[in-house]
Amino acid sequence: MLINTSRGGLVCTQDVIDALKSGIVGYLGIDVYEQEEKLFFRDLSEDIIQDDQIQRLMSFPNVLVTAHQAFLRTKRWSRSRIRPCRILKELRAASP
């Protein structure tokens, strides 16, 4: 399992994709991404995402991509962790 909540550039996305495909990395959780400034800070729900690497990452059932939460205040922090934790539990329960 690889979790990156630090900086997107710490992990080479193509290497992680290759490691996920080969089974070297079993699970990936990220809230940062190398090209995050183009994707994470505005609503793109009506747009076609042109970034093939993030699209590929999000296609894996064992990858969780969440919004970076470092800027949130304490009150919002606890609420922002409930959903990702629930998703991680569901992924874990679904794995063989």
Image (cartoon, helix red, strand yellow):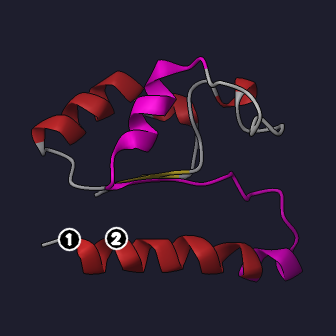
Mark 1 lies on a secondary structure that is: loop
Mark 2 lies on a secondary structure that is: helix
Say which residue appears at 12% left-offset and 73% top-offset: 96
Q: How many marks?
A: 2
Say which residue appears at 52% left-offset and 28% top-offset: 9
Disc 1 and disc 2 in contact, CB within 8 angstroms: yes
Residue 57: x percent and y percent?
A: 41, 37
- The alpha-carbon separation of the residues under discs 1 and 2 comes to 6 Å
In the image, 91: left or right of 42? left
What label sits on residue 95 in the rendered view? 1
The one nearer the camera, 61 or 41, is 61
| Residue 68 on the magenta span | yes
In the image, residue 62 sits, relative to residue 24, either above or below, namely below
In the image, residue 20 sits, relative to residue 50, either above or below, namely below
Say which residue appears at 51% left-offset and 80% top-offset: 86
| Residue 71 on the magenta span | yes
In the image, residue 95 sits, relative to residue 9, either above or below, namely below
Which residue in the structure is indicated by mark 2? 91
What label sits on residue 21 in the rendered view? none
Q: Which residues are magenta?
A: 50-78
Q: Quadrant of residue 71?
A: bottom right
The amino acid type found where label 1 is placed reads Ser
Residue that sits furthest to the front in the current view: 46
